[in-house]
Every structure is written in structure tokens, then in C-alpha cells.
Image (cartoon, grey):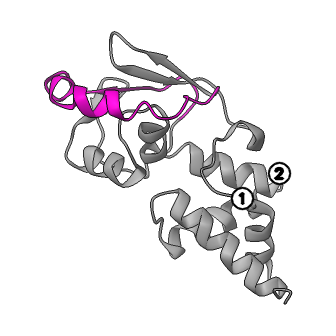
Amino acid sequence: MNKKPYALQLAAKQRIRREYGGISEHVLRRIHDASAASRKQTISDMIASLESRLETAVFRLNFAPSVKSARQLITHRKIKVNGKITTAPSYKLKIGDEIEIQDKMADILQPQLEQAQKHDVPSYFEVIKPERKGKFINMPNIEDIPYSANVEPNLVIEFYAR
């Protein structure tokens, strides 16, 4: 039995939401609308917006085992961006931003950090291990993103284009 296009698009949207830690429908819609309005390539712009969120960066840098736990670290004031504590998980990183774990938390989180080393750090991040820092060095391409599931951003774009 073939799935209808709507069912495929809805499933793709739900996979994207799960991939980014259960991001809300409202936030995903807002990111899509901003990407569509930018008149660039909507798919790559939307994915770049999702990947440049602080919560995603903390997870991709292996500072947290999941996006949800990265979100918790950020809201509990344990993450700094460019030397300043940032409490907004949705903070949009700019190229060259440095992300670090607060010194007092780095020792406490050390066992978790070693356990979280399950995935490779994407090429658009640079890790400075002894200092427990990471740097956002460029905007990601879709091919560079290490998704855990079969994510199809083009179906998400089609879903919101209805």
C-alpha cells in the first residue's frame, strides 16, 4: 500500500522535529517561513538555521548526549558563547562564535562527555578539546549533517508549502 504524499510529508516533518530535540511546531514553522522569505535556497537555509541553534551546536560538539540535555545545560547557565553565559537554547550562532562549558561544570560533566563521544563532530564545527570549547566555523551543507534517521527536508518544505 503506497502512502499518500501528505502522509510522507507529515512523517518527514515529525522526523525533523524529533531530530532537533522535539522542537515545537510553531518554531519549525517560523524557521521555514523565514527561510522561504529569504529567497535563497529554502532547504539549505532552513537546515542551516536549525543547525546554527545553540542547543543543536552543544549536542553536535558532544558536550551533551542529546539535544534535550543540551537544552537543559543551556537553561541552567552552564554554557558560554564567546565568554558570556547564554540561557537561550534558540540562540542563533554566527560564524566564528565559540561555545564552551563553564569551568566548574566541565569537571562534573567529564564522565558524561566521554560517554557522549558516540558521534563525530561535523565539519562545520571545530573542537578545542583541552579547553572544552568548540567553534562554529561555517554554515553547514545538507550533506555534512550527521542525521540519525532518514530525514528528508524537501518533504518538510512541501508540507509547509501547502
Q: Amino acid at mark 1?
A: Ser
Q: Is residue 62 above or below residue 92?
A: above
Question: Dot 1 corresponds to which residue?
Answer: 35
Circle 1 crowding by C-alpha within 10 Å: few under 14, some 14–19, many from 20: many
Q: Residue furthest top?
A: 130
Marks 1/2 in contact by CB < 8 Å: the verdict is yes
| Residue 40, numbered circle | 2
| Residue 23, numbered circle | none
**Between marks 1 and 2, how big is the CA–CA gap?**
7 Å
Quarter of the picture containing the C terminus is bottom right
First to last magenta residue range: 94-123
Circle 2 crowding by C-alpha within 10 Å: few under 14, some 14–19, many from 20: few
Q: Is residue 3 above or below residue 147?
A: below
x 30%, y 40%: residue? 86
**Residue 101 within the segment the image draws in magenta:** yes
x 42%, y 33%: residue? 62
